[in-house]
Image: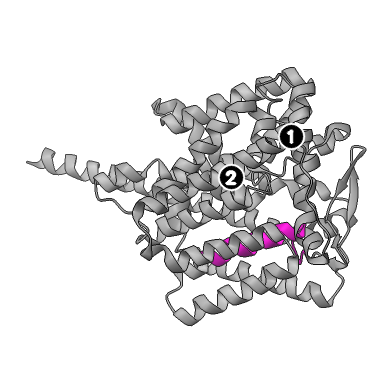
C-alpha cells in the first residue's frame, strides 16, 4: 500500500515538473517574441540611436534571440524523434532551396542572410503551440504597442522625426535604415517604424487582436476608426484595401455559408498567382490619365510591366529554371549583396517563385489551405483571428511579398502550424 502511494506521489511530482518546465519555456518564448515585436515597432528611433552610438549591430540581436527557443525545440525533436509532417516538409523545403541558393548565387553569405530574413517565420511555425495560448495574456502588450504605433504615425504628420531617411554602412554595404519617401506630394508616414508599409501592417495586425478579443463594442469601433485613419496616413494602398476587406468580412462572416468562407482563401490565391503569370505572357499597358488614377495605379502598373516580368527573367536568366534561385535569390538579400539584379518580388507567389520556381504554386496553395481550415468554425476567437490574419496576408500578398515583413512573417508561421492542429483538437474537444 505504501509503495502504491509513493508511486502515485512520484508520478504527480513528475507531472508537475514537466508542467513547470513547459510553463517556463512558454514564458521564455513570450519574452523573446515581445522583445522582437517591440523592437520592430520602434525600429526607426532604435536604429537612429544605435547608429549614432556606433552600435548598430545591437538591432539584430532580437532576431537571433528568436532562434534560441527554436534550437531548444530542435534538440527536443532530436531527443524524442518526434516530428510532424508539416515541420518535416518545411525542413526539406528549406534544405533544398538553401542548396539551390548556394548553387545559383555562389555567395553563401547572401544565402545565410536569406535564412536570416526568414527567421520570424521559422520562429512562428516552430513556436505556434506556445504562442497561441498566450495571446489573451499578452493582450495588454498588444494594446500598448497599438497605442504607441498609432500615436507615432499621427505625430509624424506634425513633426519631422530625426531618424526619417536614416542611412548607414555595415562592412561597406549601404543600408537604408529608415525609408523616407513621397507619393504624388504626400509623405508616406512611418511613425516609429522603419517604413510606412511596416507601420501600416503593424497597426492593422495589432488592431485585429484588439477588435476580436476586447469585449466592449465601443472599444472595437474606436480601434477600427483610429487604426484605419492611421493606416490611411501611411498611404500604403495595399494594406488600406486589404484591411477594408478584412474588417468588412469581420462584420459579415456569420451571414456567409461555411463553404464560401473556406473558398475565399483559394479565390484570393488564384488572383495572387494568375495576375503575375498574365504579366509574364502579355505586354500590359494601363491607360492612366487622371490624378487619382495615377495615385492609385502607378505602383501597380510598375509591378505589371517591370517588377513581375523582371522576376521571371531573373529566374530564367540567372537561376536554374524552372526551379528558382534558392533562398537569398530575390528580395532584401539581393539588395545587400546582388544589387545589380535586385528584384523585390512584390507579390507572394512571385517572391516564392524567385526562391523555389514553379514549386511556389504548391506552396501558396498550401498556405491557402491552412487559412481555409480556420473557416470551419469562426465562433472561436482564435479561429476568427487567424482566419482574418490569413485573409489579410493573402490579399496584401497580391502586391507585396509578405514574407519579408517581420510581423506578417511571424504570424504566417503561427497560422500555418496552428491549422495543422485543428482536426486533432476538435476530435478530442481540446481548447488552447
201 in the magenta segment = yes
Q: Is residue 375 visible from the viewing direction of this image?
A: yes
Separation (CA) of disc 1 from disc 2 = 30 Å
Query: On the rendered image, what quadrant is the N terminus found in?
Result: top left
- Residue 261 in the image: state x and y as whole percent: 41, 54
Q: Is residue 85 left or right of residue 221?
A: left
Query: On the rendered image, what quadrant is the C terminus found in?
Result: bottom left
- Residue 165 in the image: state x and y as whole percent: 88, 58
Q: How many marks?
A: 2
Q: Label 2: which residue?
A: 271
Q: Residue at x 57, y 49 (%)?
A: 394
Q: Name the secondary structure under disc 2.
A: helix
- Residue 240 in the image: state x and y as whole percent: 65, 63
Name, please, the residue furthest toward the bottom: 218
Q: Is residue 147 visible from the viewing direction of this image?
A: no
Q: Residue at x 65, y 50 (%)?
A: 406
Q: Name the secondary structure under disc 1.
A: helix
The answer to which image quadrant residue 45 occupies is bottom right
The kind of secondary structure the magenta stretch mainly shows is helix
Magenta stretch in the rendered image: 189-209
- Residue 304 in the image: state x and y as whole percent: 75, 43
The answer to which image quadrant residue 194 occupies is bottom right
In the picture shown, does residue 213 fall above or below 19?
Answer: below
Amino acid at each position: 500500500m505504501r509503495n502504491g502511494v509513493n508511486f502515485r506521489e512520484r508520478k504527480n511530482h513528475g507531472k508537475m515538473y514537466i508542467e513547470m518546465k513547459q510553463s517556463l519555456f512558454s514564458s521564455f518564448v513570450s519574452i523573446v517574441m515581445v522583445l522582437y515585436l517591440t523592437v520592430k515597432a520602434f525600429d526607426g528611433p532604435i536604429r537612429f540611436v544605435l547608429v549614432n552610438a556606433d552600435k548598430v549591430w545591437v538591432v539584430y540581436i532580437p532576431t537571433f534571440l528568436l532562434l534560441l527557443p527554436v534550437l531548444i525545440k530542435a534538440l527536443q525533436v532530436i531527443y524524442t524523434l518526434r516530428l510532424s509532417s508539416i515541420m518535416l516538409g518545411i525542413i526539406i523545403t528549406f534544405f533544398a532551396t538553401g542548396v539551390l541558393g548556394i548553387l545559383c548565387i555562389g555567395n553563401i553569405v547572401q544565402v545565410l542572410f536569406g535564412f536570416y530574413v526568414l527567421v520570424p517565420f521559422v520562429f512562428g511555425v516552430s513556436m505556434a503551440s506556445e504562442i497561441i495560448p498566450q495571446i489573451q495574456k499578452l493582450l495588454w502588450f498588444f494594446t500598448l504597442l497599438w497605442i504607441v504605433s498609432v500615436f507615432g504615425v499621427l505625430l509624424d504628420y506634425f513633426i519631422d522625426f530625426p531618424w526619417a531617411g536614416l542611412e548607414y554602412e555595415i562592412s561597406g554595404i549601404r543600408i537604408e535604415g529608415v525609408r523616407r519617401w513621397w507619393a504624388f506630394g504626400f509623405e508616406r508616414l512611418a511613425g516609429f517604424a522603419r517604413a510606412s508599409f511596416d507601420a501600416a501592417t503593424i497597426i492593422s495586425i495589432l488592431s485585429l487582436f484588439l477588435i476580436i478579443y476586447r469585449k466592449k463594442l465601443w472599444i472595437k469601433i474606436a480601434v477600427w476608426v483610429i487604426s484605419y485613419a492611421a493606416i490611411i496616413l501611411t498611404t500604403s494602398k495595399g494594406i488600406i484595401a486589404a484591411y477594408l476587406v478584412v474588417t468588412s468580412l469581420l462584420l459579415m462572416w456569420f451571414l456567409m455559408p461555411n463553404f464560401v468562407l473556406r473558398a475565399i482563401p483559394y479565390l484570393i490565391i488564384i488572383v495572387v498567382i494568375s495576375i503575375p503569370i498574365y504579366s509574364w505572357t502579355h505586354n500590359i499597358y494601363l491607360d492612366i490619365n487622371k490624378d487619382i488614377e495615377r495615385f492609385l495605379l502607378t505602383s501597380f502598373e510598375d509591378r505589371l510591366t517591370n517588377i513581375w516580368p523582371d522576376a521571371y527573367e531573373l529566374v530564367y536568366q540567372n537561376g536554374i529554371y524552372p526551379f528558382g534561385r534558392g533562398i537569398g535569390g530575390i528580395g532584401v538579400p539581393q539588395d545587400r549583396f546582388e544589387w545589380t539584379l535586385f528584384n523585390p518580388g512584390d507579390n507572394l507567389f512571385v517572391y516564392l517563385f524567385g526562391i523555389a520556381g514553379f514549386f511556389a504554386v504548391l506552396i501558396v496553395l498550401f498556405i491557402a489551405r491552412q487559412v481555409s481550415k480556420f473557416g470551419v468554425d469562426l465562433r472561436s476567437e482564435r479561429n476568427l483571428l487567424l482566419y482574418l490574419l490569413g485573409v489579410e496576408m493573402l490579399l496584401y500578398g497580391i502586391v507585396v511579398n509578405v514574407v519579408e515583413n517581420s510581423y506578417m512573417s511571424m504570424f504566417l508561421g503561427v497560422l500555418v502550424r496552428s491549422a495543422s492542429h485543428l482536426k486533432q483538437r476538435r476530435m478530442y474537444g481540446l481548447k488552447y
